[in-house]
Image (cartoon, rainbow, N blue to C red):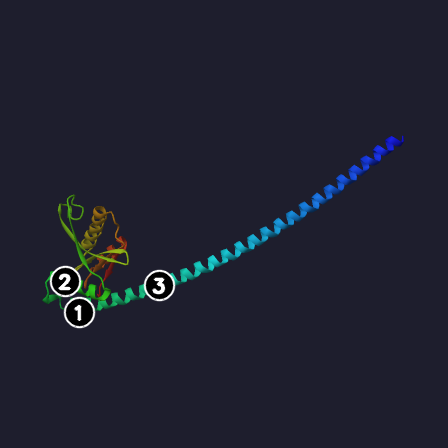
Amino acid sequence: LDRHEQEIARLREDMNRLREDMIRGFERHDKEIAKLREDMMKGFERHDREIERLREDMIKGFERHDREIEKLREDMMKGFEAVNRQISALGARWGLMSEEAFREGLRGILEKEFGVKVEKWRTYDEEGLVYGYSSEIEVDLVVKDGKTLLIEISSHVRPSDVTSFVKKAELYERKTGKRPDRLIMVTPYVEEKAIEAAMRRGVEVYTRL
């Protein structure tokens, strides 16, 4: 009986030691979990601060970009206003000028006001895309701030002129692989139907009626 009681006592002691070990293990595990939670919270807080700084930097960048775009728009509007004034002056003298002289004069105004070089782009339209038959095609070209502008200068713009200009732009894209960023017609006189056609086809018309 004494031996049996001794075995029971040892078993109880072993159970107590196991319980204590388990309790210490759980406590250590809880501490590790708490430490991990703290590290995660610190990581999330740091991540949130970095995200907030990134958001602030992006907002500042967008605001700066908007200011630059607005400044560019103002400069362009001033340039176009100056061009319009001089278009009116040229238009008033149109009776004394030939069509080619008018185009050359207006081309010079564009170069002066915008500080760009107006170049002549020429190609041969073998398939007759523009006029319905094979012909030599030319159009004024300006590259400014990485943007390609096709410009048609004429003393008088009719609806058919708008259609031909759009087809010239299509031919330019087909020949060069580059889509023009803007299509601009400059003239002292444009017919009402031509204005409607230009609006439908995305062509900008600058004139003083």
Measured as percent of width and height from the top left, residue 72 is found at 31, 63
The residue wearing badge 3 is 68
Q: Amino acid at mark 1?
A: Ala
* Mark 1 and mark 3 residues within 8 Å of each other at the beta carbon: no
Question: Residue, x 72% and y 45% (percent of image)?
Answer: 24
Q: Residue furthest right?
A: 1
The residue wearing badge 1 is 89
Question: Given this view, does label 2 or label 3 mark the residue nearer the observer?
Answer: 3
Drawn side of residue 87 relative to residue 8, left or right:
left
Which of the 4 quarters of the picture holds residue 13? top right
Is residue 169 placed above or below 155 in the rendered structure?
A: above
**What secondary structure is marked by label 3?**
helix
**What secondary structure is marked by label 2?**
helix
Drawn side of residue 23 relative to residue 91, left or right:
right
Measured as percent of width and height from the top left, residue 123 is found at 16, 49
Measured as percent of width and height from the top left, residue 30 is found at 67, 47
Which of the 4 quarters of the picture holds residue 9? top right
Distance from the alpha carbon under mark 1 to that under mark 2: 14 Å
Question: Given this view, does label 1 or label 3 mark the residue nearer the observer?
Answer: 3
Question: Residue, x 84% and y 34% (percent of image)?
Answer: 8
Q: Residues within 10 Å of mark 2 (few under 14, many from 20)?
A: few
Question: Residue, x 16% and y 53% (percent of image)?
Answer: 138
Measured as percent of width and height from the top left, residue 189 is found at 19, 63
Quadrant of the snapshot with the C terminus: bottom left
* Mark 1 and mark 2 residues within 8 Å of each other at the beta carbon: no
The residue wearing badge 2 is 104
**What secondary structure is marked by label 1?**
helix
> In front: 208, or 13?
13
Q: Answer with mark 1 or mark 2, whichever residue precedes in sequence.
A: 1
* Mark 2 and mark 3 residues within 8 Å of each other at the beta carbon: no
Quadrant of the snapshot with the N terminus: top right
Q: Amino acid at mark 2?
A: Glu
